Image (tube, rainbow, N blue to C red):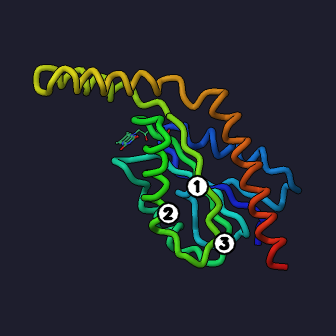
Amino acid sequence: MKKYLVTYASETGNTLKLAQEIHNAINCPKDDKSLVDIRTWNGTLDAELYFIGFWINRGSCSLEIIDLISSLHGKNVAFFGTCGLGDSYEYHKMLEQNARAWLADDNNYLGAYFCLGKMRREIREKYEDMRGKCADYQIDSMLERFDNSAEHPDNQDLLQVRLFTDEILVKAENYTAAYV
Ligand SMILES: Cc1cc2nc3c(=O)[nH]c(=O)nc-3n(C[C@H](O)[C@H](O)[C@H](O)COP(=O)(O)O)c2cc1C
């Protein structure tokens, strides 16, 4: 069994960047940690601490991620992810709660980190094409959100996810220490 597993779903590479940063930030012998694309998941890997990452698709995460989250028992678990449409504490909290709903209570949940992730250019064009069919203020708001995410994840996001990783590792260590 690995000590640390960083697994992720990423269509366009944003969440992959966070996953790589987390994986690099875990300071341990190489064999104690793994970085795994959820699409290659075959259920045979096991770990003490899971960092599970996903991109937000219509407010939720992919089925493969839900399957993994709901299969866990007795694990230390943290989430991370990227989203294109919101950078507020409340929005990130809602995304966290949506994912957490799939996690059984016998796990030790440690926390989540979300940041903005840029969206494909075609999405901006789709919004533009809606002009005349929706109210201008709605289109402008969607375009603004698109543009806000265009440079993310940036270096600041990567720094934050490193700090998040350190925090989660300390929490997991303290939790384990309390039970040995
Ligand atoms: C089909 C589709 C649906 C999306 N739905 C949402 C959504 O509901 N909420 C949100 O904040 N972002 C949404 N996004 C934006 C992505 O979550 C965001 O760009 C993310 O960083 C992509 O991550 P990836 O590069 O790891 O695939 C959506 C993007 C696509 C393509």
| Kind of residue at badge 2 | Arg
Q: Which residue is mark 2?
A: 100
Q: Type of residue at label 1?
A: Phe
The N terminus - image quarter: bottom right
Q: Secondary structure at mark 1?
A: strand
Along the line of sight, the residue nearer the viewer: 121 or 127: 127
Q: Which residue is mark 3?
A: 75
Sequence-first tag of 3 and 2: 3
Q: Quadrant of the C terminus?
A: bottom right
Q: Is residue 2 above or below residue 26?
A: below
* Direction right: furthest residue: 29
**Residue 174 picture quarter:** bottom right
Q: Residues within 10 Å of mark 3 (few under 14, many from 20)?
A: some
Quarter, ligand 1: top left
Question: Is 77 on the left or on the right of 32, as rendered?
Answer: left
Per the image, label 2 sits on a secondary structure element best described as helix
Going 65% across and 77% down the picture, which residue do you hit? Answer: 74
Tell me the quarter of the picture where residue 49 sits.
Answer: bottom right
Q: Which mark is residue 1?
A: none
Residue at mark 3 to residue at mark 1: CA–CA distance:
13 Å
